[in-house]
Image (cartoon, helix red, strand yellow):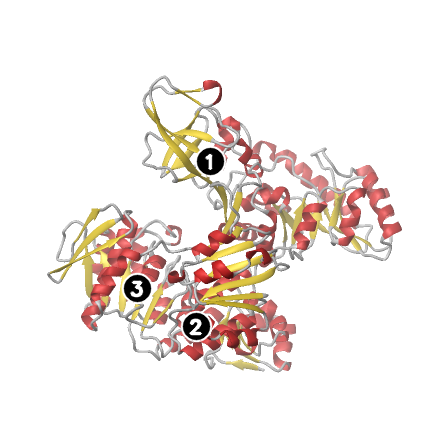
């Protein structure tokens, strides 16, 4: 049933905006959002079949899609037809916000929003029942979903708001309506969306146009100036709690380093307050001071226990800004999401879990939720329903609530369940040898010290890790998607261990983001992907008769590049798998002269395929020789023309049209006219824009890090490393790193050619790179043993390192040894 109404009526349903995160169909309403890259309307029928009965759809999409319109009209569902689904979602959240009169804190700024929010929650949880944004839910959609969680049991809200374009904040302001505002700072993030820094500040300040009070640091001159102009005109009665580290005004701050952190003294209304934090960096000091003044304001409105409030600053911890996927013992993978456990955060972590290794059993290790704003019975019911809705095989509940209500959980969830009163009992009593081939989510509130559990589960390797930023991977994928449009498919190359990034994990993420094809080098790589739940079509670049049986067993599609390989494949299929429908990919040689059919092969090629039943050409493709270099443009255009000619000759003799593709990452940028039906995305996905045309468009995906094992001071004339090649010219501090050429750090970086980043200082390699260790000069760096060191990432960039030793980024990426632990994270 179609309902033409901008006003949506729903009774506290779950607001769903991503079809992949369905947990409780009967209690959900799906907002079909048409975005630049995805269209939620495509999944309405699928979601209806799974049990959702209420939808919000966009008028122009329904009117332009007769099949969708007929389905919505004739099916037993309720579909609200609106102009814009995101605006409808925001309006719904705005109405929900109006129901509650308790104080709400709104936080914006360039950096520190999530940290300030999480720290405030920790500092004030002894005084208030708090509802807050899960993680960094601060977008146009995220804010609406966060505010929707407000309830009558809570008495304080804390929400963050982030914008990247002008005119966005006014939408968020109407949803949050903060009584108390915090402007953390201003910086370069999202500068591209604004004409100037001044405009960006003005836009962010719109969050506070009806606020009673605003906390900010007046040492940011630009914020101070814009405040005087904007808020005094729009909201002249707002109370400004502006503080300074320069003793400007009545609210000043002084700091003093201690052995364990920083002692902070703040002055407010003539009173001074002292507290200590376990950090020394300026950003943490600034975030803590914002929290302190916010607490003092809340105390002025309704008394809180300031002794407890300030005492808790000593226990502040770094906020886990990202979900991390780590390799564990016994063929397990661990999702590390310790230190924070609320219903919203648990939902997000379970969603992240659903994106990986679908054939592994899923294990949830979770602590009691200490604060939710819900009555105990409501909380237990919500928690049980959430666990029940997920494909969880094993539930391990830790805490008195889980332990006291174990029958309530074990009986209803129908999974293997274990319950312990505390973390120590779990660590001593649980049989970890039985935990194998699993994906384990560890989600615990801070008092339960779940880091001990992670340390027990995670594979013990040396301190070198390769961190893979899944958000940057998504950014790069979407960058190329925008280039090719919605009509062209994407095949992603995950060969060579996904360019060193980890093929299983990357493939899982790509499947979640609905790419069209994957490509691997050898059948065994495809087999591993299939065994780990990858269902996408997979092209195999290199196969031979000894491995053909794996192609059929695991539904893999081979590249065929010659009459010899075609004959061998067709003979194998006809004799062993005559009734199986198989797909092949034909490679044409248009100038690479490595592999591929030539024009003289085409007639025989097509005749043999047409003569063999149940064989389909899935795609025809070729490979550009020099798309990454401008000097080869003319040759590349000849290749494209030759490909067009040869592929057309093949399709003219078929009664169907196979996909055609020739563009690699560089070709997508340099030759957009040649995108055909599909493109092949390789090195570009991993952050290297090899054409050089838009070098700043991509984000770094992989960061190789290691640690300092030892530091020594050596005098002039002493030598370092094998063959005494590192000669000390003056007294120097030399650090030994836990990485060598066996880990993938090339010997070409020896003797000053390579530089690594130590606490933001580039330090040169001294002597020769060893098999497992490398020595560097850290004389100019402030560092200690155990500190982390960046081998490559944003700085130094892998392209710079490759150029220094006369190679290409591909070689360095694929050269990172598999003995180096991969950590995959999502912020």
Tag 3 residue? 206
Disc number lying in front (2 or 1): 2
Up the image or down, 258 lies above or below 450; here it is: above
Q: The residue tagged with tag 3: helix, strand or loop?
A: helix
Secondary structure of residue under mark 1: loop
In this view, the residue in front, 104 or 324, is 324
Q: Residue furthest left?
A: 270
User: Cα distance, mark 3 to mark 2?
Assistant: 43 Å
Q: Where is residue 781 in the image (x, y as percent from the top left)?
A: 33, 34
Which tag, 2 or 1, sits closer to the chain's start? 2
Quarter in which the N terminus is drawn: bottom right
Give the class, few, some or many, for how many residues have Cα within 10 Å of label 1's Cα (few <14, many ≥20).
many
Which is more N-terminal, label 3 or label 1? 3
Q: Is mark 2 on a helix, strand or loop?
A: helix
**Residue 262 shown left or right of residue 624 in the figure:** left
Circle 2 is placed at which residue position? 401
Residue 139 coordinates in the image, percent (x, y): 42, 62
User: Where, quadrant-wise, is the C terminus in this rendering?
Assistant: bottom left
Q: Can residue 209 be seen in this view?
A: no
Q: Which of marks 1 and 3 is in front?
A: 1
Q: Which residue is drawn at 77% across and 40% down?
A: 561
Q: In this view, does 178 lie to the left or right of 431?
A: left
Q: Quadrant of residue 644?
A: top right
- Residue that numbered label 1 is attached to: 738
Q: Is residue 654 left or right of residue 130?
A: right
Q: Can residue 298 be seen in this view?
A: yes
* Sequence-wise first label, 3 or 2: 3
């Amino acid at each position: 049933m179609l309902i033409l109404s901008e006003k949506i009526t729903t009774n506290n349903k779950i607001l769903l905006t991503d079809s992949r995160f369905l947990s409780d169909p009967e209690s959900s309403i799906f907002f079909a959002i048409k975005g630049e890259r995805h269209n939620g309307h495509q999944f309405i029928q699928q979601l209806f079949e799974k049990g959702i009965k209420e939808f919000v759809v966009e008028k122009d999409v329904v009117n332009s899609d007769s099949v969708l319109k007929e389905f919505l009209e004739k099916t037993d569902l309720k579909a609200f037809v609106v102009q814009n689904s995101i605006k409808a979602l925001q309006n719904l959240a705005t109405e929900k916000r109006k129901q509650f009169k308790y104080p709400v804190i709104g936080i914006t700024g360039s950096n520190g929003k999530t940290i300030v929010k999480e720290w405030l929650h920790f500092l004030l949880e002894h005084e208030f029942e708090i509802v807050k944004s899960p993680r960094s839910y601060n977008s146009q959609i995220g804010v609406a979903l966060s505010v929707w969680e407000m309830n009558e049991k809570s008495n304080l809200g804390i929400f963050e708001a982030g914008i990247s374009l002008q005119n966005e904040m006014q939408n968020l302001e109407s949803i949050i309506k903060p009584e108390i505002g915090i402007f953390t700072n201003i910086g370069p993030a999202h500068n591209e969306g604004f004409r100037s820094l001044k405009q960006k500040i003005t836009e962010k300040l719109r969050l506070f146009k009806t606020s009673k009070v605003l906390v900010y640091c007046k040492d940011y001159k630009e914020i101070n100036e814009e405040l005087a102009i904007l808020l005094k005109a729009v909201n002249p009665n707002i109370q400004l709690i502006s503080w300074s580290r320069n003793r400007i005004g009545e609210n000043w701050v002084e700091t003093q380093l201690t052995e364990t952190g920083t002692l902070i003294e703040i002055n407010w209304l003539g009173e001074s307050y002292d507290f200590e934090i376990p950090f020394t960096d300026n950003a943490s000091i600034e975030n803590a001071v914002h929290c302190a003044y916010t607490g003092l304001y809340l105390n002025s409105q309704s008394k809180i226990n300031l002794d407890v409030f300030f005492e808790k600053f000593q226990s502040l911890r770094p906020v886990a800004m990202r979900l991390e996927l780590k390799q564990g013992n016994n063929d397990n993978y661990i999702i590390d999401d310790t230190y924070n456990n609320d219903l919203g955060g648990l939902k997000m972590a379970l969603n992240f879990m659903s994106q990986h290794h679908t054939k592994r059993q899923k294990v949830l290790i979770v602590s009691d939720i200490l604060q939710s704003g819900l009555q105990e019975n409501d909380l237990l019911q919500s928690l049980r329903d959430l666990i029940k809705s997920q494909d969880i095989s094993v539930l391990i509940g830790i805490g008195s609530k889980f332990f006291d209500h174990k029958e309530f959980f074990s009986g209803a969830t129908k999974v293997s369940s274990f319950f312990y009163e505390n973390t120590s009992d779990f660590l001593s009593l649980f049989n970890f040898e039985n935990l194998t081939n699993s994906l384990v989510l560890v989600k615990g509130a801070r008092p339960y010290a779940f880091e001990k559990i992670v340390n027990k589960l995670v594979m013990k390797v040396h301190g070198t890790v390769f961190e893979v930023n899944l958000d940057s991977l998504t950014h790069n994928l979407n960058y190329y998607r925008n280039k090719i449009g919605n009509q062209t498919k994407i095949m992603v190359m995950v060969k060579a261990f996904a360019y060193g990034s980890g093929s299983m994990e990357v493939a899982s993420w790509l499947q979640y983001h609905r790419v069209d094809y994957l490509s691997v080098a050898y059948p065994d790589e495809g087999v591993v992907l299939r065994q780990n739940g990858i269902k996408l079509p997979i092209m195999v670049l290199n196969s031979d008769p000894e491995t053909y049986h794996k192609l059929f067993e695991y539904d893999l599609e081979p590249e065929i590049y010659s009459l010899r390989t075609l004959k061998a494949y067709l003979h194998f299929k006809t004799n062993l798998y005559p009734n199986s429908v198989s797909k092949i990919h034909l490679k044409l040689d248009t100038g690479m002269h490595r592999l591929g059919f030539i024009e003289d092969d085409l007639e025989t090629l097509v005749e043999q395929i047409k003569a063999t039943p149940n064989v389909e050409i899935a795609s025809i493709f070729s490979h550009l020789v020099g798309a990454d270099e401008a000097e080869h443009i003319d040759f590349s255009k000849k290749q494209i023309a030759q490909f067009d000619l040869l592929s057309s000759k093949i399709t003219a003799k078929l009664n169907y049209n196979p996909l055609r593709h020739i563009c690699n990452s560089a070709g997508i940028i340099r030759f957009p006219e040649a995108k055909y039906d599909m493109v092949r995305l390789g090195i570009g996905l991993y952050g290297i824009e090899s054409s050089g045309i838009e070098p700043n468009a991509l984000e770094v995906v992989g960061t190789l890090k290691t640690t300092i094992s030892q530091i020594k001071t050596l005098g002039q004339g002493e030598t370092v490393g094998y063959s005494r090649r590192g000669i000390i010219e003056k007294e120097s501090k030399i650090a030994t790193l836990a990485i060598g050429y066996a880990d993938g750090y090339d010997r070409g970086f020896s003797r000053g050619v390579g530089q690594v980043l130590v606490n933001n200082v580039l330090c040169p390699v001294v002597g020769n790179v060893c098999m497992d260790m490398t020595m560097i000069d850290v004389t100019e760096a402030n560092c200690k043993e155990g500190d982390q060191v960046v081998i490559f990432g944003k700085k130094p960039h892998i392209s710079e390192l490759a150029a220094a030793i006369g190679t290409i980024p591909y070689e360095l990426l694929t050269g990172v040894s598999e003995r180096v632990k991969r950590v995959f994270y999502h912020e």
